[in-house]
């Protein structure tokens, strides 16, 4: 039995705003019957103020899908479209006092329905681009497609690296066999597939025996900053997937100050996220740098000056 | 309102007689069966008696053919691994696409180790194609492992015939009879099955006790090595209390076999036809002409199984579902997919599994409870409205006879 909060149960048994909305002028359809959940969000938007006057839903799905839909309609009522677009899936989950990790995708579906409905209102095209794989790490709700993507994009070869990049495997460790299987599959792929030129250049692609850190030529200050920027850019989509973001504020010799934004901010994994990004910077630069929250900047710099 | 338990394929309640027989083995009868004193001796005697009970249930010839294990899963693993280790010249396994994960997950693992695994597909009613099976059998086949009855649909496979076909190529034959024991008339002496798994908690014995039936003269390699318990074929001090419980449960199962295939079957049929008569766009899955007497698996189109279960549970009714959401996976049950049940229905499959404790009053309460639940969820479903519109359009269009408007999916 799922560990559903009282709030989830309450919204499932007594869904708010269920059923069609007669004069809806913004409709978002997401999901499909294939994956077992689908949501149609219907909004009535005031054309003057772009404020959401009413919101209804129809959902095919499990208990938490229905509860998430119900919560979503309650959250967005009264918001302007721009405000509504700021609603994160975490907010939907929080509204319900949390969802089990396997069910977080229900809140993601809610957020996507919202984006689709707004796009529909504004006459824009909206493409559902998220792929979903089987849940691998239950501690941090990381699925196989995310792990595969990150392993491919960064040429990862160990469970430890996967943990740095995605958090997967950083808790109870019971998913390590699953992560190792993914690594093995992708590494087998690499051996047979012709190496893509972009990857072939990166030192990560060398055989394990040659994996010892190769001394890199020193970078100019400009090159170094560019390298830091590129590395952070590569990580950004991952954070955005969790509805967070990162911004470089200052680079001061070994200290890189950043602002974590959105869901990353104040999240209990903030430290882990920082050290994950730091590990990648260290690898990209071939030298030790420290990643620090921008809030520490004045203190440290002041002290040094 | 008393809760109604219709999830007996997941696990069953211990029979009170089973519990009563077990209790002394937690207190005064605590001895180790291997010990050379009266404490141990009494326990050894009780285990011997339980072994005889299991022999009677399976029709086994020798008591030494019964190996107690910790569960059905252990029995399955032991059987398949033993066959591969004992016959190094054979490295292929034949199984079916609809086995329990106890077999399927092991086979997936073995594949990575280089074992060749063939998985027989099933048709829309969950039946095997024996010609396809025959074509796969070869001198490289170490073991065939096929379940006697499917846990989700209750569909029964022609195990005795399949065992003979396996022997024709010199392969071993194992059957996971966890769901069949106590409901299907099993007499291993009449067959040439080499190994058979059963699990106590599916037949009113406790959880955590299983049996591997191992025909005399079958080459064997133990999974657990250590002490000489179970003649060295399954080391580890015996779970005396549970073994005693299983012995009692086995004898009770034999006594109730006729009841299971009479009264329980009648109640199952009453439940199934009662629900199907009232709920449109629903159908029974599996081979309804050849299945366990206690199991009914109904697919409700355009609704999702977990939502149904939560609403049933609110009314005190316990069942289970093959939907993806209940297991936390992405796909609906592998059994439904193997049968080619379309996604519109596969996510909404509900398994009702009865037992000898199920009453007619309970069945009638469920028949009453289900239709409004399905209707309410369909009202909530974006697909249902579209579907309903289509159906009324069809109805209007059809001039041929009084259409009962019973939407019949093409695969039903
Ligand atoms: C067909 C089948 N095989 C094996 C098992 C596993 O048995 P156990 O839970 O005793 O390991 C089950 C129980 O769910 C089952 O239904
Ligand atoms: S499941 Fe991945 S660390 Fe716990």
Image (spheres, rainbow, N blue to C red):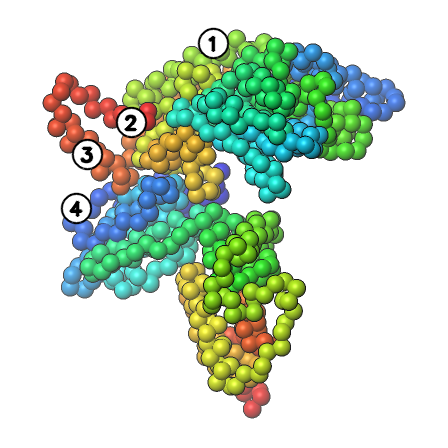
Count residues near mark 2 (Cα–Cα under 10 Å), then give few for <14, some for 14-19, many for 20+: few
User: In x, y percent, where is residue B117?
Assistant: 56, 35
Residue at x-position 58% and y-position 36%:
B116
Q: Say if mark 3 contacts mark 2, CB within 8 Å.
A: no
Q: CA distance from mark 1 to mark 4?
A: 53 Å
Label 1 in the same subunit as label 3: yes
Write down the quadrant of residue A208 in the picture.
Answer: bottom right
Q: With A190 as the anchor, is B310 left or right in this view?
A: left
A230 lies above or below A106: below
Chain at tag 2: B
- Which residue is label 3 attached to? B390
Count residues near mark 3 (Cα–Cα under 10 Å), then give few for <14, some for 14-19, many for 20+: few
Write down the quadrant of residue A247 in the picture.
Answer: bottom left
Chain at tag 3: B
Q: Nearer the viewer, mark 3 or mark 2?
A: 2
Query: Mark 3 or 2 closer to N-term?
Result: 3
- Which residue is label 4 attached to? A22
Q: Disc 3 beta carbon < 8 A from ligand 1?
A: no
Q: With A204 as the anchor, is B387 left or right in this view?
A: left
Query: Residue B10 or A129: which is nearer the viewer?
Result: A129
Q: Nearer the viewer, mark 3 or mark 4?
A: 3
Count residues near mark 1 (Cα–Cα under 10 Å), then give few for <14, some for 14-19, many for 20+: few
Q: What is the secondary structure assignment of the residue under circle 4? A: loop
User: In x, y percent, where is residue A181?
Assistant: 57, 49
- Which residue is label 1 attached to? B262
């Amino acid at each position: 039995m799922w560990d559903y909060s009282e709030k989830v149960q309450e919204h499932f048994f007594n869904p708010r705003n269920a059923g069609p909305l007669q004069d809806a002028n913004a409709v978002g359809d997401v999901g499909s019957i294939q994956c077992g959940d689908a949501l149609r969000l219907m909004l009535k938007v005031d054309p003057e103020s772009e404020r959401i006057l009413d919101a209804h839903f129809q959902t095919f799905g499990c208990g938490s899908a229905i509860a998430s839909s119900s919560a979503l309609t309650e959250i967005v009522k009264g918001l302007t479209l721009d405000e509504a677009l700021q609603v994160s899936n975490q907010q939907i989950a929080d509204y319900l006092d949390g969802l089990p990790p396997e069910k977080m995708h229900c809140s993601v579906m809610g957020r996507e329905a919202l984006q689709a409905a707004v796009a529909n209102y504004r006459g824009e095209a909206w493409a559902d681009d998220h792929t979903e794989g089987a849940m691998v790490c239950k501690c941090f709700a990381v699925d196989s497609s995310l792990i595969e993507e990150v392993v491919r994009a960064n040429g990862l070869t160990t469970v430890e690296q996967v943990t740095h990049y995605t958090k997967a495997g950083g808790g109870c460790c019971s998913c390590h066999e699953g992560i190792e299987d993914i690594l093995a599959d992708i590494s087998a792929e690499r051996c047979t597939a012709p190496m893509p030129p972009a990857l072939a250049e990166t030192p990560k692609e060398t055989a394990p025996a040659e994996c010892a850190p190769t001394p890199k030529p020193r970078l100019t200050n400009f090159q170094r900053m560019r390298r830091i920027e590129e590395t952070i850019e590569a990580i950004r989509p991952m954070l955005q997937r969790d509805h967070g973001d990162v911004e470089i504020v200052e680079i001061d010799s070994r200290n890189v100050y950043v602002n974590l934004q959105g869901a990353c901010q104040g999240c209990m994994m903030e430290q882990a996220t920082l050290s994950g990004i730091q590990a990648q910077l260290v690898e990209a630069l071939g030298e030790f740098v420290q990643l620090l929250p921008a809030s520490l900047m004045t203190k440290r710099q002041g002290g040094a000056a | 309102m008393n809760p109604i338990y219709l999830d007996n394929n997941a696990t069953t309640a211990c029979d009170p007689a089973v519990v009563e027989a077990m209790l002394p083995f937690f207190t005064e009868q605590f001895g180790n069966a291997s010990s050379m004193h009266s404490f141990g001796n009494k326990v050894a005697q009780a285990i011997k008696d339980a072994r005889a009970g299991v022999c009677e249930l399976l029709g086994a010839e020798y008591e030494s053919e019964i190996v107690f294990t910790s569960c059905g899963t252990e029995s399955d693993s032991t059987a398949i691994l033993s066959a591969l280790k004992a016959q190094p010249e054979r490295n292929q396994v034949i199984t079916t696409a609809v086995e329990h994960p106890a077999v399927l997950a092991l086979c997936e693992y073995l594949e990575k180790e280089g074992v060749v695994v063939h998985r027989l597909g099933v048709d829309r009613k969950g039946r095997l194609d024996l010609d396809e099976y025959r074509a796969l059998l070869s001198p490289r086949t170490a073991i065939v492992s096929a379940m006697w009855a499917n846990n989700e649909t209750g569909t029964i496979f022609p195990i005795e015939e399949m065992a003979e076909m396996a022997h024709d190529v010199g392969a071993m034959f194992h059957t996971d009879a966890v769901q069949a024991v106590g409901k299907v008339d099993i007499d291993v002496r009449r067959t040439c099955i080499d190994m058979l798994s059963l699990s106590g908690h599916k037949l009113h014995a406790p959880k955590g006790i299983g049996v591997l039936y191992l025909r005399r003269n079958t080459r064997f390699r133990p999974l657990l090595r250590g002490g000489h318990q179970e003649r060295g074929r399954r080391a580890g001090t015996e779970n005396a209390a549970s073994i005693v419980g299983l012995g009692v449960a086995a004898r009770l199962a034999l006594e109730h076999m006729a009841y299971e295939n009479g009264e329980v079957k009648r109640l199952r049929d009453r439940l199934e036809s009662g629900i199907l008569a009232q709920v449109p766009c629903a159908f029974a899955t599996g081979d309804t002409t050849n299945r366990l007497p206690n199991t009914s698996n109904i697919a409700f189109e355009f609704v999702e199984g977990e939502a149904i279960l939560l609403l049933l549970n609110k009314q005190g009714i316990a069942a289970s579902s093959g939907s993806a959401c209940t297991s936390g996976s992405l796909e609906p049950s592998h059994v439904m997919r193997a049968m080619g049940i379309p996604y519109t229905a596969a996510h909404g499959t509900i398994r009702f599994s009865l037992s000898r404790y199920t009453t007619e009053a309970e069945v009638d309460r469920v028949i009453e409870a289900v239709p409004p639940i399905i209707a309410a969820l369909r009202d909530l479903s974006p697909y249902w409205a579209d579907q309903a519109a289509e159906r009324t359009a069809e109805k209007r269009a059809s001039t041929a006879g009084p259409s009962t408007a019973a939407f019949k999916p093409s695969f039903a």
